[in-house]
Image: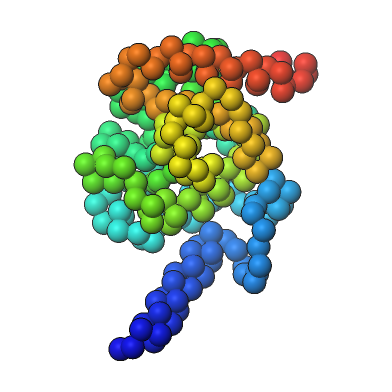
């Protein structure tokens, strides 16, 4: 097979996978040219589907090889219209077994962090970039992130959070499309399709490196302060 024919067949295969994924996500039309998604572009079509309906639509996903070893598809948990959304990188062993994000030791620490700034777990939404556990809890591969990220974007569009908090380097780099290290991204808000996005350490990292707890505490206080500024008096 000559090189040009191989490239053409690879392109056809890639196009078929893209079209299938778009159909699974509920898109009825494909456009030749699409600008980066913004709040105004994403939200209108989400009015036709709830978070629960979207979960049902994608829970049996087989788009990448990670589905072969999963126990549960870890969609996310929390308030359907939460003002704040926390996003980690991928499920771990405990999360895979239970089908819920952040339920292991890192999850317990996250609950304590939330409580420290007067947030309850049920008031926010918690999810991951990936919905299936990578083998041995290794870092997600670029192709796995690329395949699964549209699901996360759809969740964000449905939930419409005021603030997103990326937990850890992998989540932050995936969402912001950057290679900058975490210490260059934390401590300030970034614009993410018209929403505020804050970066801080993953709770699992704090269990291994307690010295980062001070920085995380500063980040979470910054989040709480910004949220209090954003909500109106009638929301209090």
Q: Is residue 223 above or below residue 18?
A: above
Q: Quadrant of residue 11?
A: bottom left
- Establish if 121 lies above or below 54: above
Q: Quadrant of residue 101?
A: top left
Q: Which residue lies furthest to the left in this view?
A: 136
Estimate the x, y position of residue 215 in percent, counting from the top left.
46, 16
Left or right relative to 137: residue 228:
right
Q: How is the image coloured?
A: rainbow
**Does residue 211 appear in this view?**
yes
Q: Which of 226 and 86 is in front in this view?
A: 226
- Residue, x 51% and y 70% (percent of image)? 19
From the image, which quarter does the C terminus lie in?
top right
The residue positioned 33% from the left and 14% from the top of the image is: 210
Whole-percent x and y of residue 163? 61, 30
How many marks can you see? 0
Q: In which quarter of the image is residue 229?
A: top right
Q: In this view, does 75 lie above or below 230?
A: below
**Residue 26 located left or right of residue 202:** right
Question: Residue at the spot x=33%, y=88% of the render?
Answer: 2
Residue sitting farthest toward the bottom: 1
Quarter of the N terminus within the rendering: bottom left
Tell me if I can see residue 78 in this picture. no
Using the image, determine if residue 203 lies above or below residue 152: above
Q: Which residue appears at 31% of the width and 42% of the height? A: 139
Q: Position of residue 138 (x, y in %)?
A: 27, 42
Residue 113 at x, y percent in the picture: 45, 16
Q: Does 133 sit left or right of 224 as displayed?
A: left
């Amino acid at each position: 097979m000559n090189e040009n024919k191989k490239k053409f067949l690879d392109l056809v295969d890639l196009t078929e996978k893209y079209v299938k994924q778009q159909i699974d996500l509920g898109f009825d039309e494909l456009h030749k040219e699409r600008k980066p998604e913004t709040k105004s572009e994403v939200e209108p079509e989400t009015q036709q589907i709830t978070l629960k309906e979207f979960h049902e639509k994608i829970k049996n996903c087989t788009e990448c090889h990670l589905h072969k070893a999963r126990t549960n598809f870890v969609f996310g948990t929390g308030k359907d219209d939460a003002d704040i959304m926390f996003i980690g990188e991928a499920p771990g062993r405990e999360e895979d077994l239970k089908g819920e994000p952040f339920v292991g030791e890192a999850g317990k620490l996250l609950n304590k962090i939330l409580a420290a700034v007067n947030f309850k777990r049920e008031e926010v939404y918690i999810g991951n970039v990936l919905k299936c556990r990578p083998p041995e809890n290794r870092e997600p591969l670029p192709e796995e992130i690329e395949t699964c990220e549209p699901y996360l974007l759809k969740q964000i569009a449905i939930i419409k959070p005021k603030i997103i908090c990326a937990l850890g380097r992998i989540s932050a780099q995936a969402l912001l499309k950057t290679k900058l290290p975490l210490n260059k991204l934390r401590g300030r808000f970034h614009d993410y399709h018209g929403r505020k996005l804050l970066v801080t350490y993953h709770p699992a990292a704090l269990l291994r490196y307690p010295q980062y707890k001070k920085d995380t505490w500063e980040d979470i206080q910054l989040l709480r302060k910004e949220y209090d500024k954003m909500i109106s008096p009638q929301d209090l």
